[in-house]
Image (cartoon, rainbow, N blue to C red):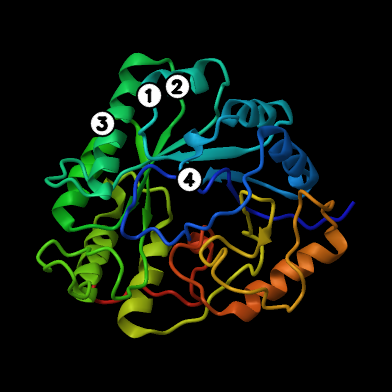
């Protein structure tokens, strides 16, 4: 057996979603969706070569066979988490906790008290209600994770207080900006470019007060981001190709950020793990080659906390 292992594999259980968050980059392609039994077949093919699975989408709770998939992950002793927008009925989450014994839940929400009806706001409302329900109405004792896209300082502070109160950790996502991405600065009118200055301000705020926030990532993560945004210097210690994604049809991609958006960089046919067994002698190399030659890394990479720059020094601005 090969000694190679993927550190983190994203399983796109379904591409279906009942929200339309403005910063979501998952293409709404009409592709085949594997059944629970097919997902189990794919999982079993790669499980010996995976340290951790992350069940995402879309919205995983929209897949009719999700309980079957979760129960199988427990059966084989896999390490995993599931990201949800909190919109499923609470009784379903209770079923996942009590009957399926789900190990780790990650609730997606970006602020505590949204004041509009955008998809991001609906997600935050449902997420807040779900965290309250799990903590007050179930016996779930594990640490909940709140997955949040960076926001303004006041919104982040409120979310951090909420996380501390409910024994949650925050997985904070910081994205490189483009014109069509989420408006992080609440002072920006709709349609204007996001504020790079506002993002730097928030990152400084977090780095300065790191010890008082229940953040999932190490302190060096935020120092690295500040260096990147302000000085544009340093080299990644990137573990190329160790965080692939498996699409809802079984296709294997080097990562989830560009899944479905690009043609295979290798020029080879896309590996489909529903149709063929995982081959550690060739598939590890194929994923790494695609990753290295893509050059499109973003801050959404799940290994970003391990991509710390060489020779990090606490800069004067901290």
| Foreground disc of the pair 4, 1 | 4
Q: Which circle's residue, 3 or 4, is located before the other in the chain?
A: 4
As displayed, is residue 313 above or below residue 120?
below
Q: CA separation, marks 2 and 1?
A: 5 Å
Residue depicted at 24% across the width and 66% down the height: 204
The residue that label 3 is drawn on is: 165
Q: Nearer the viewer, residue 290 or 141?
A: 290
Name the front one of labels 3 and 4.
Answer: 4
Q: Nearer the viewer, mark 3 or mark 1?
A: 1
Residue at 20% in and 73% down: 195
Q: CA distance from mark 3 to mark 4?
A: 32 Å
Task: Give the Cα distance between marks 3 and 2.
Answer: 24 Å
Packing grade of label 2 (10 A; few <14, some 14-19, many >=20) is few
Q: Position of residue 102 (x, y in %)?
A: 55, 27
Q: Which residue is mark 1?
A: 89
Label disc, if present, on residue 92 of the rendered structure = 2
Query: Which residue was labeled with disc 4?
Result: 16
The quadrant in which residue 294 appears is bottom right
Tell me if I can see residue 38 in this picture: yes
Distance in Å between CA atoms under marks 3 and 1: 23 Å
Q: Are the two marked residues, 2 and 1, in contact with CB atoms closer than 8 angstroms?
A: yes
| In contact (CB < 8 Å): disc 3 and disc 2 | no
User: Would residue 179 be found to the left or right of residue 279 on screen?
Assistant: left
Task: Note whether 277 is above or below 223 in the view shown.
Answer: above
Which image quadrant for residue 44?
top right
Residue 40 placement, left or right of 142: right
Q: Residues within 10 Å of mark 4 (few under 14, many from 20)?
A: some
Q: Is residue 240 above or below residue 106?
A: below
């Amino acid at each position: 057996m090969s000694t190679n292992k993927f550190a983190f594999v994203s399983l796109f259980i379904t591409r279906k979603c009942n929200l339309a968050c403005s910063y979501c980059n998952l293409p709404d392609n009409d592709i085949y969706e594997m059944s629970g039994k097919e997902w189990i077949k794919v999982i079993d093919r790669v499980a010996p070569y995976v340290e951790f699975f992350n069940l995402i989408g879309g919205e995983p709770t929209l897949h009719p066979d999700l309980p079957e998939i979760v129960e199988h992950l427990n059966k084989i002793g896999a390490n995993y988490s599931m990201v949800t927008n909190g919109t499923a009925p609470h009784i379903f989450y209770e079923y996942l906790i009590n009957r399926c014994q789900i190990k780790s839940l990650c609730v997606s929400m970006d602020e505590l008290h949204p004041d509009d009806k955008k998809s991001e706001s609906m997600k935050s409302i449902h997420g807040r209600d779900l965290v309250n329900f799990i903590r007050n109405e179930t016996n779930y004792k594990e640490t909940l994770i709140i997955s949040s896209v960076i926001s303004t300082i006041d919104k982040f502070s409120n979310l951090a207080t909420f996380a501390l109160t409910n024994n949650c950790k925050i997985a904070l996502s910081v994205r490189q900006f483009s014109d069509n991405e989420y408006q992080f600065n609440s002072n920006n009118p709709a349609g204007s470019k996001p504020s790079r200055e506002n993002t730097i301000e928030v990152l400084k705020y977090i780095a300065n007060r790191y010890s008082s926030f229940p953040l999932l990532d190490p302190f060096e993560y935020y120092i690295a981001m500040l260096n990147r945004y302000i000085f544009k210097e340093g080299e990644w210690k990137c573990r190329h190709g160790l965080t692939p994604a498996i699409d809802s049809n079984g296709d294997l991609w080097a990562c989830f950020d560009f899944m479905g958006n690009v043609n295979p960089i290798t020029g080879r046919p896309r590996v489909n793990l529903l149709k063929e067994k995982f081959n550690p002698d060739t598939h590890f190399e194929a994923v790494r080659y695609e990753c290295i030659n893509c050059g499109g890394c973003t801050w959404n990479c799940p290994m970003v906390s391990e991509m710390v720059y060489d020779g990090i020094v606490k800069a004067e601005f901290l």
